[in-house]
Amino acid sequence: MNIEEPILNDHNKQEYPPMHTVEHLLNQTMQRMFGCKRSIKTHIERKKSKINWDIDKAPTLDQIQEIEDIINDLIDQDLPVNYQIVNIAEIPEGISIEKLPSEASEMIRIVRIGDYDICPCIGAHVKSTAEIGRFKITSSCYNNGEFRIVYKVFPVENL
């Protein structure tokens, strides 16, 4: 029996897997804490990354610390990162495809991080959250309904 590999979209950039996996954790944390959608702007790099969300009001310093604590707790939980290839017409209920490009392929890769986050993604990820290391918010700002977090990860080998 000849099983064909599904045709997926190419990616225009090779992300740093720990930093990109944190993007997923942050998006889900922001959705849970503030009821917002996933990020509106992202810039994911090895040394530092930044992500912006539309939210109604500026988070408090305690809430920003809580975000950092939640992400580090998720890292400590050693959640598995798994992939599933599905036909775009058969996306499981509850998974948003609003960020998919109009030219997205028929087959979509769904990324699942434990029971915490699930979404379509073609980027590079770690195999489990324990591979990320430590997460640190280095700055944040709020301007006209847009909240930005700038963050770093400190790989396991640097701990």
Image (spheres, rainbow, N blue to C red):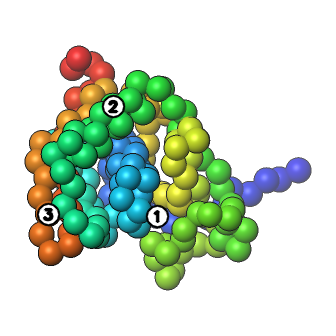
Element type where label 1 sits in the image: loop
What amino acid is labelled 3 in the image? Tyr
Residue highlighted by disc 1? 10
Residue 35 vs residue 106: left or right?
left
Earlier sequence position, callout 2 versus callout 1: 1
Image mark for residue 70: none
Instruction: Tell me if residue 27 comes above or below residue 63 in the rendering.
Output: below
Instruction: Tell me if residue 122 comes above or below residue 63 in the rendering.
Output: below
The residues bearing labels 1 and 3 have C-alpha atoms spaced at a distance of: 33 Å
Give the label, 2 or 1, closer to the camera: 2
Residue highlighted by disc 3? 142
What amino acid is labelled 2 in the image? Asn
Earlier sequence position, callout 3 versus callout 2: 2
Element type where label 3 sits in the image: strand
Give the label, 1 or 3, closer to the camera: 3
The residues bearing labels 3 and 2 have C-alpha atoms spaced at a distance of: 23 Å
Q: Quadrant of residue 86?
A: bottom right
**Other-residue count near label 3 (Cα within 10 Å), few / some / many at <14 / 14–19 / ≥20:** some
- 43 or 65: nearer the viewer: 65
Instruction: Tell me if residue 3 comes above or below residue 62 in the rendering.
Output: below
Element type where label 2 sits in the image: helix
Q: Quadrant of residue 126?
A: top left
Q: Residue at x 54, y 68 (%)?
A: 96
Q: Quadrant of the C terminus?
A: top left
Q: Quadrant of residue 65?
A: top left
Image mark for residue 72: 2
Q: Residue at x 68, y 64 (%)?
A: 93
Residue 12 shows in the view: no
Q: Looking at the image, do the residues carrying marks 2 and 1 touch, with CB atoms under 8 Å apart?
A: no
Q: Looking at the image, do the residues carrying marks 1 and 3 touch, with CB atoms under 8 Å apart?
A: no
Give the label, 3 or 2, closer to the camera: 3
